[in-house]
Amino acid sequence: MPIGVASDAGYELIVDGYVNDSMNQPVDDATVTVSIMTLDDVVRTAYVVTTSGGGYYIVLFGGTEWSTEDFVDVLATYGTDTGSSLHHPADEFGTQLQDIDVTISTLVIPEFSSFLAVSLTILVTVTVMGIRRSRPR
């Protein structure tokens, strides 16, 4: 085999983990793309799965789909929110199992019972009413 060419690992690689939001809550039904990347950042193999209950995902790569010199990239999306965990050595610790968790960034909207939300709602309402009253008819 030529120098610098990675050979197939010859055994399966399992990549699994959890997708959580920025509040550390599991994200069900997130789309997760797990890619095997070569040293040159070329996608060798990729699978797209959906998280199940508790934000869990799992992908199985066959022995010819990855090399011991490759990297694992995980990208999770839920609506417009995304998160990633990149460049994990595929053969880290010489195991067939990679646990890779991902946190997606989410926009936290305050509840309307909070002081800030109520104040903002009142301010916008008063401003709109003031503008409507100041316009000549």
Image (cartoon, helix red, strand yellow):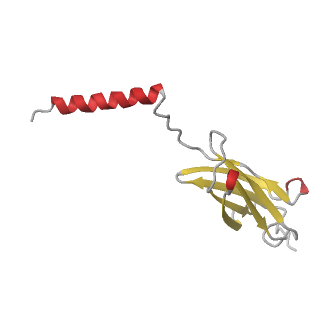
Please state the horizontal and vertical placement of residue 80, each as a whole percent of the image.
52, 52
Quadrant of the rendered structure where residue 4 is? bottom right
The quadrant of the rendering that contains the C terminus is top left
Q: Does residue 86 sit above or below 50 in this rendering?
A: above
Q: Nearer the viewer, residue 16 or 55?
A: 55
Please state the horizontal and vertical placement of residue 110, each as a whole percent of the image.
50, 34
Quadrant of the rendered structure where residue 52 is? bottom right
Does residue 100 appear left or right of residue 21 in this picture? right
Does residue 133 appear left or right of residue 107 in this picture? left
Q: Does residue 87 sit above or below 66 in this rendering?
A: above
The quadrant of the rendering that contains the N terminus is bottom right
Please state the horizontal and vertical placement of residue 104, each as a whole percent of the image.
62, 47
Please state the horizontal and vertical placement of residue 88, each as a whole percent of the image.
77, 53
Q: Nearer the viewer, residue 56 or 5?
A: 56
* Residue plotted at (89% across, 57% down): 95
Q: Residue furthest left?
A: 137
Q: Residue furthest right?
A: 94
Q: Does residue 133 sit above or below 37 in this rendering?
A: above
* Residue plotted at (85% across, 63% down): 68
Quadrant of the rendered structure where residue 72 is? bottom right
The mark tally for this picture is: 0
* Residue plotted at (69% across, 66% down): 46
Q: Nearer the viewer, residue 11 or 137?
A: 137
